[in-house]
Amino acid sequence: MASTEREIIGVDDRVSVGRAIPLGIQHMMSMFGSTVLVPVLTGLDPNVAIMCSGIGTICYLLVTGGKIPSYLGSSFAFISPIIAIGATQGLDAAMSGVIVSGCVYLIVAGIIKIVGTGWLNRVLPPVLVASVMVVIGVGLSATAVKMAFLTTTDGVSSFYSVGAIVAAITLVAAVVLSSLGGILGTVPVLLAIVIGYLVSIPLGLVDFTRVASAAWIGLPNVSAPRFDWGAVILIGPIAFVTIIEHIGHLLAVGEIVGKDYRDMLPRSLCGDGISTIISGFLGGPPTTTYAENIGVMSVTRVYSTQIFWYAAGFALLVGGFCPKLAALIQSIPSPVMGGVCLLLFGLIASNGLRMLVTNGVDFDVNRNLMIASVVIILGVGMETSGVSIPLGNYMLPGMATSTLVGIILNLILPMPKGKKDAEPEVAGEKDASK
């Protein structure tokens, strides 16, 4: 059994340039679809968004000292307010709200730095963290399924049999390749995307029009922000919602790689905030840590932050200076990315279930059962159905809502005598090979 397990490349490990390049491209390809979708929906420039994701990830790695393997891409939480401000005041005005939201990150990071992170162990016990991981993975399942099996014509979605075949082939390729050892086993997502893409070409799913017309070398269409109080009031506070999601992602990364990142939360938030501020000044969307890349780490067992430097560099190059490569990657059909995401998102949820087991969460304890039940059903239900709770001008998505409800339940439900929820194993660094 041990002989079939792939090598684990740890957070601090280094690989050769020949291996780092495909691994970096794999991470860039995994985040590409979602990162481009946000600017497409809001009217921002996709190439600028790609470039800003690269710049933001580099800033994040610098701020965190290269200790946290995470990729930053476009945030979906800000889509509606950016569209609203863009329609009335212009996208340049919306960017002032984006910049302020990044400043909110810095303020919260400073507060946590002062008060410490010890409260996280009490507020976010293993049963809650694991449940949130399940929500992250399963909550994104609807997005992956829609990409894999549906097509939209004149605003009406219907089952797309050809796309489903491509998605199935891509998924099978990713699963088979991920079970292999050696170099192939470390880049299954990238190879699966290539296989799916090649299958899509003769089926007529790939449109090369934009690729042919795009220039090989070009500069991004950056734009300066314009301060607007309305944008600041509407967009800035949304950062409090994404901060909750950020914490969930950080704990998920720590669980997957086998490290405790709770003490690094202020630096992690600071890195995300600086990334968002820079993106706002360049005319890009707010950034956030990406579940897709968390999934890639889970399937490949390659956790080295070195790879994220390469991924960020490629995104900066493609989005900032090579429109043709950007157009080529954007030509990847949705079913291909959907097939891959079915695996990536599922692995995040599976790691949440594994965390319940490894931390010995006792479901004979009624409070544990109640917390997990409410958090998972509420979060997954809201995320998959697209329901958000309106709070004035803001919308609270499923993951943030379920996390807040879980925190409240954890604080108010009594702990039975003689029963105690297991302390987080991540409170001390654990063996990533387990």
Image: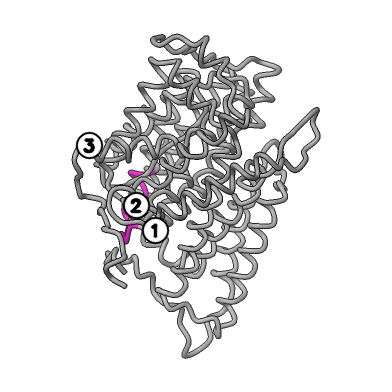
Describe residue 57's horizontal placement relative to residue 342 as left or right. left
Instruction: Give the CA separation, mark 3 to mark 2.
Output: 15 Å
Residue type at the position of mark 1: Ser
Describe residue 265's horizontal placement relative to residue 131 as left or right. left
Residue plotted at (29% across, 33% down) = 310
Instruction: Give the CA separation, mark 2 to mark 1.
Output: 6 Å
Q: At which x and y percent is residue 280?
A: 48, 23
Residue plotted at (54% across, 64% down) = 131
Q: Does residue 377 show up?
A: yes
Instruction: Give the CA separation, mark 1 to mark 3.
Output: 21 Å
Q: At which x and y percent is residue 389?
A: 71, 48
Q: Give the labeled residue for mark 1.
A: 179
Helix, strand or loop under label 1? loop
Q: Give the labeled residue for mark 2.
A: 185
Query: 351 or 235, which lies in front?
Result: 351
Q: Does residue 92 show up?
A: no
